[in-house]
Amino acid sequence: MVKLYDGGVYLVNGTEIVPESESAKVESLTGKAVTKDEAKKGTMAYGIMKSHNQSEDMAHLRIKFDAMVSHDITFVGIIQTARASGMEKFPLPYVLTCCHNSLCAVGGTINDDDHFFGLSAAKKYGGIFVPQHIAVCHQFMRENFAGGGRMILGSDSHTRYGALGTMAIGEGGGELTKQLLKQTYDVAYPGVVAIYLTGKPQPFVGPHDVALAIIRAVYAKGYVKNKVMEFVGPGVSSMTTDYRNGVDVMTTETTCLSSIWRTDDDTKAFLEKHHRGDAFKELNPAEVAYYDGCVYVDLSSIKPMIALPFHPSNAYTIDELYENLEDILRETEKKAEAVAEGRATYTLLDKITPDHRLQAQQGVIAGCAGGNYTNVVEAAHALKDKLIGDDEFYLSVYPSSQPVYTDLDRKGLLADLMDAGAIIRTAFCGPCFGAGDTPANNGLSIRHTTRNFPNREGSKPGNGQMAAVALMDARSIAATAANHGKITSAEELDCWGDVPEYNYDDKAYKSRVYWGFEKAEEDRPLRFGPNIKDWPEQEALTDNILLKVASKILDDVTTTDELIPSGETSSYRSNPLGLAEFTLSRRDPEYVGRAKAVRSLEDERKTGKTDASIAAVFDVIHTIPGFDGVKAEETEIGSTIYARKPGDGSAREQAASCQRVLGALANITEEYATKRYRSNCMNWGMLPFHMKGEPTQFDVDDYIFVPGIRKALDDNKLEDIPAYVVKDAKYEEIHLYIQPMTENERRIVKDGCLINFNRNGQK
């Protein structure tokens, strides 16, 4: 059972939940009066954020982190931005891993060029470099950096180490650049929601089952959006820390800001096993703690789950799936039609077998969620002395790090998997974002990975190719593999829970990882490849701007994978203009051409020329009362997109920077799916506009004149911004608004981007 409380709650002595409406009960339980404001300070999150806050104002946090991590899709751009902004060395431990672009087949030498750039940067600036196939970024951070009371920032959305007592946040590259420049992460104090765990998971229930059950309950309601999920209650100690890690990493899919768990002796044992016993800190909420909400989870009631395409929240118990198989698959096919938009066909009903099972074509257990030691052990036990079979279904297993891999190997567990027909691969995040194990057209892949968004398995509907992913726990994937790919609940097997003690051996790290923190060789040159390019120059914002609508997306949610596709395009992450060619390519293939045309108009304006079409627009603008003197040559021209709710998913800043280098000045939205995408827009100098109601006033290729925008930012008057749609030789007034921005965020947008802000002398 997963239950959401209406309104806030008090947690007394870590076990008693008292709804805010019954707050008088708190005094009777504790014998003392406690105010709500004081009880808010009783959360674990409050204490950690307070200790990292650089200001006296807890309502407006200015955080400095203990360590950072980036992978090879993001670290080149971050270092290039910081270098252009004046960075001389890394002021905190900064881990650069090569777990995303590990395969070097696409784009010639591009991927390994990025790796060598990363190694040279670690040597020059004093960083930690983890070569390809050694560890996925989050497992490496769990093993080497996470600890009680710490905060870690990562340029990957799944930066989550709460189960080890660390508040970790995944953000766009601009926020990491700020830390490298000794600036702060500025955010309003977030709400904190209790995730109260009771009971104990059944032996056949894995961490993905628990996570999917929670995501199903909270995602659509936005219950924890941009809040901290604080895991409390006696149920925490019913799970091992390795198991908790698997639950915790999936908190990202709820759209929360971060997570934190109470710690115990098992947390301590985990850290001691990894030679870091001094990193343990006992964390518990205070005697009375106030939470902005509560998710009550009875772990003993959780059943094996499956999240059907195209989101982790599209989840059912496997029992529910089979009770309503045709109806559920029919609804999923309708979602597939919306994703494909007539460009491809995807079917599920034809995958129902004669014995009423759903047939999958592929299984994957991988990455920061699935490749953990315990998950792979359980899969190996389920498949020992069994055969996957020689038909279409196949299974790939990616242990999350070399230490995990070697211990599984020494125990003979990898051999058991291989004897059953599984393929063992190295530590690699590719299956999570479409750069590895792409299934066949119209294939169904079942995965213990983090996401099943459209196209993250690598298909290309625009080319008539479409596959899809369903998320399942490693235990049920193994049970399915033992049943030759017919979706099978782990509950049907009786082999769970016999997990031998993990023996951590970090010889591979000592052999291959470059540990360079506080060893900067400032005179050492960076090693560049031909695809590594500097960021194009961006100009400062003018007083008035003219936007041309380059795309209008009315989907309920637009993911970062739609804004800038993952997969093979990641090879171009170090080439801003090269990567920009793929912007919205799988969602609106005409966008890039439209945006370039607008950028050409702006290029002409900067040379003093005025295109005839722009002159006609200004003829209309001059008829608006009060704007007859506005000059075209002094008004910056840029593109914009409208999307109802953009930015769900990855933290990749390229989702915003690619628009910017093509000349974008703004996004217009109903709401932003995540804080990190909105931050990316601002760090790249784009205005994060909102608009109430349906955007019926404008369409693609229409113009929107926004006067006085620089003054609105100067005066911090953003709640009502008049603008004017110009079309058909007429104008229509609309009203935009921007949610609160910090002073520095306003300055960054006015300066044109974070690089300019720093060059101009940030505060």
Image (cartoon, rainbow, N blue to C red):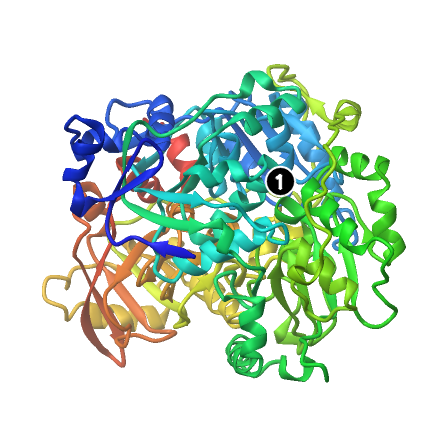
> Considering only vertical position in the picture, is 209 above or below 341?
above
Q: What's the residue type where badge 1 is placed?
A: His
Is residue 370 something that shows in the picture? yes
Classify mark 1: residues with Cα within 10 Å, few (<14), some (14-19) or many (20+): many
Number of numbered labels in the structure image:
1
The C terminus lies in quadrant: top left
> Considering only vertical position in the picture, is 26 above or below 601?
above
Q: Position of residue 619 (x, y in %)?
A: 22, 71
**Foreground pick, 125 / 469:** 469
* Quadrant in which residue 458 is drawn: bottom right
> Considering only vertical position in the picture, is 595 above or below 685?
below
Q: Position of residue 89 (x, y in %)?
A: 55, 21
Going 23% across and 50% down the picture, which residue do you hit?
7
Going 49% across and 50% down the picture, which residue do you hit?
299
Going 65% across and 74% down the picture, which residue do you hit?
466
Residue, disc 1 = 71
Is residue 604 something that shows in the picture? no
Q: Position of residue 391 (x, y in %)?
A: 85, 72
> Mark 1: which secondary structure?
strand
Q: Position of residue 442 (x, y in %)?
A: 69, 76
Q: Say left or right for 617 vs 103.
A: left
Q: Say left or right for 352 vs 216.
A: right
**Foreground pick, 182 / 317:** 317
* Quadrant in which residue 216 is drawn: bottom left
> Considering only vertical position in the picture, is 251 above or below 288?
below
Which residue reaches farthest left?
Answer: 625
The N terminus lies in quadrant: bottom left
